[in-house]
Image: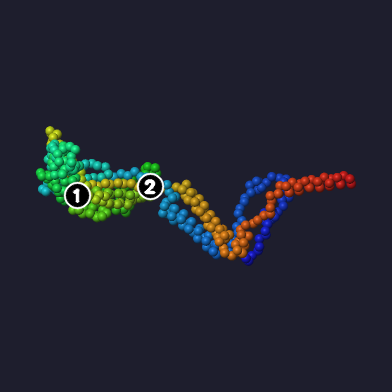
Amino acid sequence: MAGTELPSVVDEDDDRVPDPGLGKTFRWDDFFPYTTYKMVKIKDRWLGLLYWSIVTVVVFYIIVVAVVIEGKHQTRAQGVGTVITRFWGKAFLGQRALDVTDLRSPLIEPKGAFIMTKRIVVNQSQGQCVDWDQPRQCPCSEGTCVAGYCQVQAWCPSLGDQNADSPPNGAVVETVEGLGHMHMKIMAGITFPEMGTDLFIYGHTDGAEDRFSNLTIAELLSLSDPPLLVEDITDSGALLAVSFNWDCEVTMDCEPTVVVKRLDTAGFVQKHSNRRGDGQTREAIYMFGLRILITSSGIGRQFSIQLIVVQIGSGLALLRISALAADFMMLRCFRDGLTRRAYRKCKVIATNDLSDLRDRLHHIKTKSRVRHRTGTNFKGDG
């Protein structure tokens, strides 16, 4: 290898200039010295390529992945969401007009609403019949077996999940029309108590579009995944989720991502009854409808000096891997043994065996004292 060959033994004190005042006066420079590393520059393109490739990967990971994508330089906190819904408009059962009070049950419900699309009404009284909410097949431990099912004490004629498609005699089936033209408004917001008192409200950012401030039921269904028509849910009902998902930098304006998705596969029903004065008769109402569940949730992020320092420390620690990999390749992976030995000679400096240094120093001091005494005696004789 071209260049100047390094000496086999290097004494770090060889280049020091003798200090004439050493041992006589106290110096702050000796008490607070600065020690730095000596760098060896190896002119090998493969080692340089390996080293800088790993450095590039580490810098890319810290800046792009850890900071930009994963946001590890920011503290995070769960938000507290708030949702308010409002409906208005009219629909019809035959010639009768229905408003929100007739269609919505319950009338006030936090984070959601139920809008009736169809209902089955039947007058019932206490008696013996098949309970079509929980039908029992014969043989019967109690009651009478009729047509393969057990008749038990129940509200008769029974109307339940198992016979809603073919309701009993005397039942009145009514379908709501014009529901798709009813209007609704959804107001959603979120706050992050651990990071301040600011309230973020959907659609209140400059230039943001508030799609849910005034839309019809038909428009809401068209936004779902998969898209729906009012006719698709009239006979069976549906369970629809509207999710406002926030990911906010709390020092800046923020708008959520809104997801509308159908959750059910078999529809949605709700049951209600109106008792008569004697308590033995009632009007049972089996309601199909659109059940809307609305949620507002998310994460708040805030810049953190402490986490920035942690990421910088992680990057500096990971950069050490590049030097370790290059050293390993330099000392272990080259096929040419002469090249490996030459690089090792540049990298590793071996000193003499200094294990007996204490004994040698003691021997030198003893000889010095002997010479001193001998020299004094000679002067006295003169």
Callout 1: 10 Å neighbours few (<14), some, many (20+)? many
Q: Earlier in the sequence, mark 1 or mark 2?
A: 1
Q: Above or below — where is 209 with respect to 151? A: below
Q: Quadrant of residue 103?
A: top left
Disc marking residue 137: none
Frontmost residue, 36 versus 203: 36
- Residue 6 coordinates in the image, percent (x, y): 66, 60
Mark 2 lies on a secondary structure that is: strand
Which part of the image, by quadrant, shows the N terminus? bottom right
Residue 285 visible within the image: no
Residue matched to label 1: 236
Residue 300 is labelled as 2
Residue 15 location, x and y as percent? 69, 55
- The front one of 266 and 26 is 266
Q: Residue at x 32, y 54 (%)?
A: 207
Q: Is residue 370 above or below residue 43?
A: above
Cα gap from disc 1 to disc 2, whole angstroms: 39 Å
Q: Amino acid at mark 2?
A: Gly
Q: Position of residue 48 (x, y in %)?
A: 54, 62
